[in-house]
Amino acid sequence: MRSFLSFSIAQALLVLAAAACAPPSPSSSGAALPSYSRTSSRHVASYPIQHIVIVIQENRSFDNIFAGFPNADAPTFGYMSNGQKVNLQSIGFGAPDLSHGYKAALVDYDNGKMDAFDLSNPDDPTLPYSYVQYSATKPYWLMAEQYVLADHMFPSELGGSFAAHLNLIAATDKLSPTLAEADNPSNTPWGCDAPTGTQSTTVDSNRNVDIHGPFPCFTQFQTMADTMDPAGISWKYYAPQTVGCSGSCDAGGLIWSEFDAISNVRYGADWSRDVIYPQTTILSDATNGTLPQVAWVVPDWKNSDHAPANDTGPSWVAAVVNAIGNGPDWKSTAIVILWDDWGGWYDDVPPPQLDWEGLAIRVPAIIISPYARKAYVSHTQYESGSILKFMEEVFGLPSLGGTDQRANALDDSFNFDQKPRKFKTIPAKYPPPFFVHQSPSLKVPDTE
């Protein structure tokens, strides 16, 4: 279907070189964390990784970005609810947004048949059956072709971004054994800085969704901050500024970070020290050799892949990767690029249902490191907790007791016995100065 499947990385670089088992419920507030111990048989000191960077993009399924990728589970066709087989159509990032809440995910999933994406979008039932054209996603493909593409990465919960981002810092979004956070709160910013009266969306163990959930400023979640801080592990959450508080929050709260929903972070020393804006600070930190040991990076709305999107998202991610790759910390860094949810786009792989929350519809993940396997497609089942489990292994941290317990860590995507690979710059349409000098949108990257 795609002539570009034979496209050579070497050719691209030459041409463009001149261009720039369910988990336990979370601990209640104030509960003691497990004592510090290694979570892997590998000795902590033997890991050559000293920095882990999680780059989060928005709202794309695996097939929507990587349909046709060699050796991956990436077909170029799908099935509609009437049984009709359809070829995936080529689109740009600017295609319209699709339904992608918890209820839409259940419809699309269709008890594992993965054939009802048309029913979630009755106004344009064929639109979900699409892939973003290679000319727009080329940086992602070049990264995947050089390093590791994980073709079985699933968010831990069905639904949208709020729960997905919570799982990426807390390994859970459960409020109780039978109730969890789900779709986004009723107002932005998401978290303690939301306007008074904001309600979150919850889902119960019978998969009933309720829009009258608690105010999204939580005290019951232990997060990676609670394990990293006492262990002396430095971390930063690089995020864009936003607006939308309607005068009810101070200027410091106008940052699109999931840690805004964690009370002890928002109102503690971590907020001013470790929640960093603008998000482009990651570029200078990487260049200057001042990366923290753990970093999360989220884009400005202008550079989000959330539909309808500009074409700048892949270049933004490439800018982050290139800054790290060409910086002094490359030889000790692992980068994980993933998309927070499927965005309503077709995917063919039924997500295993490990409990009533999910797993959710598959998203892409690219793993980049001097120790990453070369041109490797990992078929290992990963989820949000896999990334946190890998952090725990590398830094000798205790488990948070959520999905990080059941999840497979990322180890199979690495060969820590190999000589560290030399970094090759990823060509991209927009260079780093484009993002450094770009005016902030002050919009949240995702409101769903």
Image (spheres, rainbow, N blue to C red):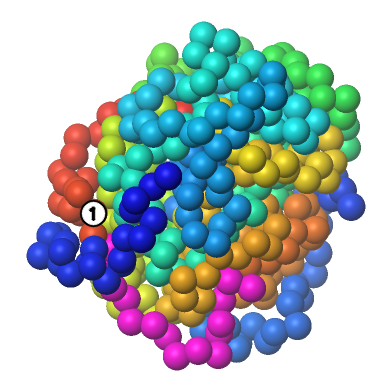
Residue marked by disc 1: 428
Question: Judging from the image, what secondary structure is the residue with disc 1 in?
Answer: loop
Q: Nearer the viewer, residue 309 or 24?
A: 309
Tell me where residue 141 appears, x and y as whole percent: 39, 56
- Within 10 Å of disc 1 (Cα), the crowding (few <14, some 14-19, many 20+) is many
Q: In the figure, 400 relative to 10: above or below?
A: above
The part of the chain drawn in magenta is: 412-426
- x, y percent for residue 270: 51, 51
Does any portion of residue 266 appear in the rendered image? Answer: no
Look at the image and say whether residue 126 sits in the magenta stretch.
no
Indicate the quadrant where residue 65 lies: top left
Residue shown at 84% from the left, 35% from the top: 356
Against 391, residue 210 (above or below) is: above
Q: Amino acid at mark 1?
A: Ala
Magenta: main secondary structure equals: loop
Residue 84 percent coordinates (x, y): 64, 24
Query: Any magenta on residue 423?
Result: yes
Q: Nearer the viewer, residue 251 or 296?
A: 296
